[in-house]
Amino acid sequence: MKEKKRRSIFGRLQRTPKWKKEEFTELEYEPTSVKELLTEMKDISELIIDLAYSAVLFDSDDIAEEVKYLDVRMDKLNYDIRMMAMMAARTKEDAEQLAGILQVAEAAESISNAAGDIANLLSLKEKTRPILPKILKQADESLFRVKVSSKSKACNQKIGGLKVESETGMRIIAIRRGDCWIYNPRSGTNLKADDWLIVRGTDDGYIDLNKFLKGQLKVLE
Amino acid sequence: MKEKTAEEIVLEIKDKSELMVDLAYSSILYDNKTIAKEVYDLENAVDSLYQILQKKSLEDVQNGKHSINDALTFLRIAHAGEQIADAAQEIADVELRDVELHPILKMSIREADVVFTKVEVKPQSILCGKTLGELKLASETGMMVIAMRHKDKWLYGPNKNTKIDPDDILFAKGPEDGEKHLIDLAAATSNEI
């Protein structure tokens, strides 16, 4: 058994996980505006919590890997924003205000670390997996998984055009298409038949969205 | 009052910590110290929940209600929630300091994927006198109300039984195109939900 396991690891072409690649890329100073950096950090800090809980809820190692990647990405952003802030400070007043920005950035990074810890629960050896979904399914705003049917009007439509979020309150946080994943899809992202969506929102919203994606509802209202 | 189960406490920590992140960001966006202070209060609540959970899960293991692994999972997930709550407090701390906020802070939060918005409900708005559950505001407009002000009173993390009264101020988060819908509804320029 052990020998078999070893063979499955060694002597085989392996894909380097995205997070590892990111971790070993050299930190280079790239001038980016503090505003852009902070906006990305804020977006990641919100997305990563949802992704971490989804990874646990749907027992998905792929999503857990994306959480790790975002966590590493956040480290880099935090490093960049520190550099940029230091270069921007000229006076004591500047420094005082910039310290606030760095504190928010640091907090966003702590959030991503906590999310990383949640996703790490999946890689534990102990059999803890079954109890997690049981807890998380009872939350106010819950995470769901829905499939886009080929009969649905949503096929080949842009998320922005369908106004999924403003019509149903359901936010699409990830899409699985075949073996690929799209995380945090934009309004210009197309939905395709057989996509699996991971969405977040209320039960009511889920019922509507599910009917629409199954093709039972023609339009989202 | 019935004692909460470990599962319920874990869930409460999860919900509270997420609400805190939303509140913390919106306190900066609206330069609002009241919301920031609420984040502090919630942080204390989460801390004490976490302590109750620690005791509770040990008791559960002793009584054979949960296995050691299950209890560990509860504690680990709650620990992460507690860290998220701490981070939210750090963000609120920036608002509470006597230093004027850097304009970039507001701009970054404003430009992010999810926007925060503040609306005042006009007396002639169709939102008045209805509960959030009746209105299905979250699923119809995509905007989730995270806090509201009723005269001098604040309500954080309202649920579906919360009623909206005239002149209430709602703080909500959601997509950009949902924001306009909510503003129109509150200002009574639109009656279509």
Image (cartoon, coloured by chain):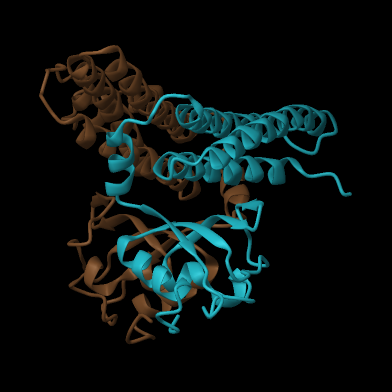
Chain colours: A brown, B cyan
Of B92 and A95, nearer the camera is A95
Left-right relation of B33 to B100:
right
Q: Is residue A41 visible?
A: no
Q: Is residue B36 visible?
A: yes
Quarter the N terminus of chain A occupies: top left
- Give the answer, above or below, for where A83 lies relative to A124: above
The image shows residue B105 at horizontal and vertical percentages of 32, 35
In the rendered image, which quarter is residue B46 located in?
A: top right
- Give the answer, above or below, for where A149 lies relative to B7: below
Residue under the image location 62 percent in, 55 percent down: A138
Residue under the image location 67 percent in, 29 percent down: B47
Of B34 and A150, nearer the camera is B34
In the rendered image, which quarter is residue A187 located in?
A: bottom left
Residue under the image location 18 percent in, 73 percent down: A156
Left-right relation of B22 to B2:
left
Quarter the C terminus of chain A occupies: bottom left
- Give the answer, above or below, for where B53 lies relative to A98: below
Of B81 and B40, nearer the camera is B40
Residue under the image location 37 percent in, 64 percent down: B179
The image shows residue B58 at horizontal and vertical percentages of 77, 27
The image shows residue B78 at horizontal and vertical percentages of 61, 33
Residue furthest out toward the right: B1
